[in-house]
Amino acid sequence: MALARRAEAAGLNASAPPQQASVEGWLIRLSPGKAKRSRCVNALAQGSLPLDDLLARCQASFDHAGLPLIVRLTPFSQPLDLDARLAAKGWPAFDAADVMVLADLQAFGQATVLPAGQRLLAVDAPTYAAAVGALRGSSARAIEAHAERLAASPVPYQGFFLQQVAEQADPRTEQPAALLACGQIAQEGPIAGLYDIFTPPEGRGQGHAKNLCAALLAQARRQGASEAYLQVGSDNLTAQRVYERLGFVFAYRYHYRSPHGVVD
């Protein structure tokens, strides 16, 4: 549970957008990006106001930002019965995600070993956000918000492409390297998070995500990390199996609720 708590705290820091505030200990995030963790309420403290008053203050902030009110519920949410109280109001639960943790990075050597013809390329935040947005089908507004959040994050941004390159390419006719997968590291001291791990549809099932994650964990270890975490959809069994083969185990589950129903 200690590592789970560290992963939750690190995940909150890693996903912090510029547009956030605190209401009675509840962390309000108002980014127009695609990721719900950047446009939701995190109930971190019980506060002194009645629940309905707290929710009304949050609703006003989300209305002003032109966003639907969403509350993220974890085992650490306050008050402890918040999930049950929102369910009793008829707010549906949706988009459950599992947080998985890896307690020791010793298995990942200091050197990044990739198959022949593959390379890891560091890319800037706008380039990364555009690639992830294209894979997600995000709007231009969401892509811009994602890039803004990455650039302004209190946890230094580190985004990478795993690319396929010709081993003996003629520089006069060399084609752009093919994108096999993309992902980023959000490292805060000894704990590193893996985020936005995506493989283009045509490259899935070929081990690219596993190769990328192993390379990212090796990179994090070189930078002093000793443990890691990630977030994955509770229904994404394929991705979960990839992470399990890397040594990750289930830590806890979270989901969202909204008075507006299921929110995309």
Image (cartoon, grey):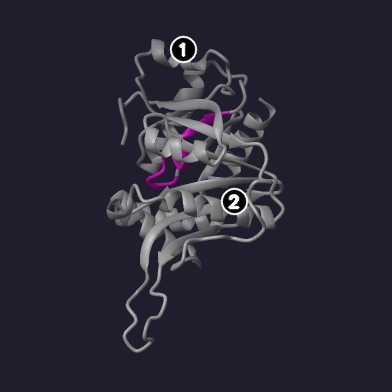
Mark found first going from the N terminus, 1 or 2: 1
Q: Looking at the picture, does residue 242 appear above or below residue 222?
A: above
- Nearer the camera: disc 1 or disc 2: 2
Q: Residue at x 53, y 25 (%)?
A: 74
In front here: 258 or 48? Answer: 258
Mark 1 and mark 2: Cα distance apart in space: 37 Å
Q: Position of residue 34 (x, y in %)?
A: 37, 45
The residue at which mark 2 appears reads as 217
Q: Residues within 10 Å of mark 1 (few under 14, many from 20)?
A: few
Q: Position of residue 3 (x, y in %)?
A: 66, 32
In front here: 102 or 140? Answer: 102
Please check the rendered image and state whether residue 106 is part of the magenta-colored stretch, yes or no: no
Any mark on residue 35, and which? none
Instruction: Kindly tell me whether residue 29 is visible in this rendering.
Output: no
Q: Position of residue 186 (x, y in %)?
A: 58, 50
In front here: 55 or 261? Answer: 261
Q: Residues within 10 Å of mark 2 (few under 14, many from 20)?
A: many
Mark 1 and mark 2 residues within 8 Å of each other at the beta carbon: no
Of the residues shown, which amino acid type is indicated by label 1? Ala
Q: Looking at the picture, does residue 255 appear above or below residue 213?
A: above
Q: Quadrant of residue 171?
A: bottom left
Name the secondary structure under disc 1.
helix
The residue at which mark 1 appears reads as 84
Q: Residue at x 71, y 46 (%)?
A: 190
If the image is split into quadrants, where does the C terminus sit?
A: top left
Of the residues shown, which amino acid type is indicated by label 2? Leu
The residues colored magenta run 31-43
Instruction: Kindly tell me whether residue 158 is visible in this rendering.
Output: yes
